[in-house]
Amino acid sequence: MTRRLFALLALLAACFGVAVLTAAPASAHVELLSSNPADGARLTSAPARVSLTLSENIGIQPNSIKVVDQQGTDVVAGPVFQPGEVAEEVAVALEPDLPDGSYLVEYAFVSADSHPVRGTIAFVIGTGPLITSAGAVSASTGTDPVTDALFTTFRWGSFGGVALLGGLVFMLVCRPEGRADPSARKLITAGLWLSGVTAVAGFLLQGPYVAGRGVGALFDPALIEATLRVAYGKLLLLRLAAIVALAVIVRRLLTSGLPERLRSRYENLGIAAGFIVMLSFSATGHAVADKIMFLSVSADLAHFGAMAVWVGGLIQLAVLLRGRYSASEAEPALARFHPIATRSIVIMVVSGAYLGFRLVPSVEALWTSAYGIVFLLKLTGFAVLLWVANLSRNAVRRGISGRGGTGVVTADLRKLRISVGVEVLIVAVVLALAAALSSMSPTG
């Protein structure tokens, strides 16, 4: 299983590695490039439609363009459509023979990376004043602060759920006897529940998050329908289905006495379901807005998968080192986990460096933008994590001594227990920073 898993991660890593030195920085989040009428335009006759040209193809998103007159009356005569062969251009038809006056165009789109972008433009028919002096294009999300905080918190929880599920690799490859350990099994079950609950919460929060409304609109049918129409909503439902399938597969894998032929089949199905869960994250994140989308999404998948395997193993290892188990039981699991952890770290470093290079627009942005500062904090946390992990590695290299399951714990095992516990705490902080980054614009 571990060979198949790392073959998949290595393939994803190889796909993007060749482009690291030559790729140009990415631009995340959809942006308005032009409009017709232009912002501030004065027209002698009423236009038949309003069209917007965006920086990426987001498809047709219903109710994403609204045009109102000075009294706030909607003057749109039909649904959003694509008026020509340019996939990035969207438009709405206007009521015929609009009277002279000022009109405000309000747009609200969901980027390919699932984040909302809103703004306004204004135009005048005749010689009257503009409806507003603040008609310039705005990239502000206008998100309700409570909804934004909940969205980020549940995103953090979803990362934690995947990390807990990554412990299944440790249990099957490094510590097969852990299938009978209630504490180890509870961690996997917690990962399934946490992943499922956060997927449902993310689906319900997406509508208010995009619309800039509070949590009172969680069950608004119109917002739920809008979420279902975009890729983010569909991918969340796909994630939820994969989690349900994974729950059935995990139950089979943790059954004692399962024939090897069936165990291998369920392991393959588990890898496939886990891949779908991770893909649902990478296909709705910043990587999908990259111009070289395949490479960035592949890098994100490799990064996320390696994180799940390593962090999930650390959490399972913390359970194993609580002092209830003999050193003779811990030693083989540590020996098996050591090369897996090393490969995971290498994949995380390489893929993380590529993603940072692609998503951060400039070196100066690292200290002049909120995204860059949080990115640096995450890098610092990861560096501290690697330093503590090296202490654990040294403890493993010195060896763990025990006598026949007597539970005698050596000084090295005590140090290892402390360092692994610290690693788990640092991981929680790093995942929180990653969740914050996922809700921020690299170019904002």
Image (tube, rainbow, N blue to C red):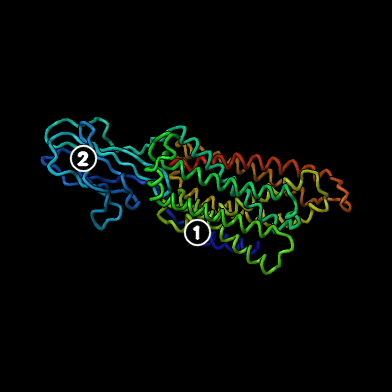
Residue at point 20% right, 36% down?
103
Label 2 sits on a secondary structure element that is: loop
Position of residue 398 relative to residue 103, above or below, is below
| Residue type at the position of mark 2 | Val
Q: List the residue tagged with mark 2.
A: 75
Q: Which mark is residue 16?
A: 1
- Name the quadrant of the C terminus: top left
Residue at point 71% right, 41% down?
421
Is the residue marked by circle 1 packed among few (<14), some (14-19), or many (20+) residues within 10 Å? many
Label 2, label 1: how many angstroms apart (C-alpha)? 48 Å
Q: Earlier in the sequence, mark 2 or mark 1?
A: 1
- Name the quadrant of the N terminus: bottom right
Depth check: 194 or 160 in front? Answer: 194
Q: Which mark is residue 41?
A: none
**Exactly how many numbered labels are in the figure?**
2
In the image, residue 149 lies at what x, y percent? 49, 35
Q: Is residue 409 left or right of residue 390?
A: right
Query: Are the residues flagged by discs 2 and 1 in contact, CB closer than 8 Å?
Result: no
| Residue type at the position of mark 1 | Phe
Q: Is residue 299 left or right of residue 263?
A: left
Label 1 sits on a secondary structure element that is: helix
User: Residue 350 occupies which quadrant of the picture?
Assistant: bottom right
Is the residue marked by circle 2 packed among few (<14), some (14-19), or many (20+) residues within 10 Å? some
Residue at point 17% right, 43% down?
95
Circle 2 or circle 1, nearest the eye: 2
